[in-house]
Image (cartoon, rainbow, N blue to C red):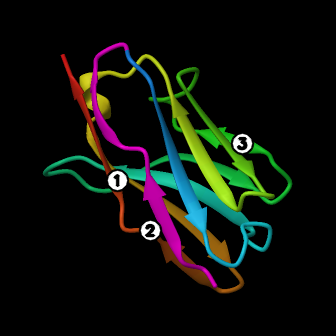
Amino acid sequence: QGQLAESGGGLVQAGGSLRLSCAASGGIGSFKVMAWYRQAPGKEREYVARITAGGDPDYAGSVMGRFTISRDIRKNTLYLRMNDLKSEDTAVYYCTGALGTATFWGQGTQVTVSS
C-alpha cells in the first residue's frame, strides 16, 4: 500500500496539453492529501498542485488556470490535466501522497515542452 506510479508524460509543443496519471496501489481514498510536484534540470523540486481527501484543490500560482488536479477513487488514480503548456513547464513530474504519518512518492514522469 502506498506505491505510486506516474505515467502520461512526453514531448509536446508549447500551447499543447497533456494529462498525467498517478496510479496508487491499495487505493487513493486513504490518502489525506495527494499532490503533484515537479523538478526542472538544475532546480529544486517545486509544488504544483494538491487535492485533499475532501476533494478541495489548490494550485501554485505559476499553473493556476492552466492545470487541473483531479482524482478517480474508483480507478485509484490521481490526474493532472495540463493545458497551454509553456517551455518553463518542462520538468520531471512526481505525484506524492500522505498516508498516516508516511509520505509516498512516485518515480516521476518526464514532461518536455518545445517552443
Q: Are marks 1 and 2 in contact (CB under 8 Å)?
A: yes
Q: Secondary structure at mark 3?
A: strand
Residue at numbered disc 1: 109
Q: Secondary structure at mark 2?
A: loop
In percent of width and height, residue 49 lies at 56, 45
Q: Is residue 4 above or below residue 68?
A: below
Circle nearer the N terminus (3, 1)? 3
Residue at numbered disc 2: 106
Q: Who's the residue at 79% across and 58% down the image?
A: 73
| Residue 96 part of the magenta-drawn span | no
Q: Is residue 42 above or below residue 80?
A: below
Q: Quadrant of residue 107?
A: bottom left
Inter-mark Cα distance, 1 to 2: 9 Å
Residue type highlighted by circle 3:
Pro
Magenta residues, start to end? 1-15
Label 3 crowding class (10 Å Cα cut-off): few <14, some 14-19, many 20+?
Answer: some
Numbered mark located on residue 57 in the image: 3
Q: Nearer the viewer, residue 67 or 111?
A: 111
Residue type highlighted by circle 2:
Gly
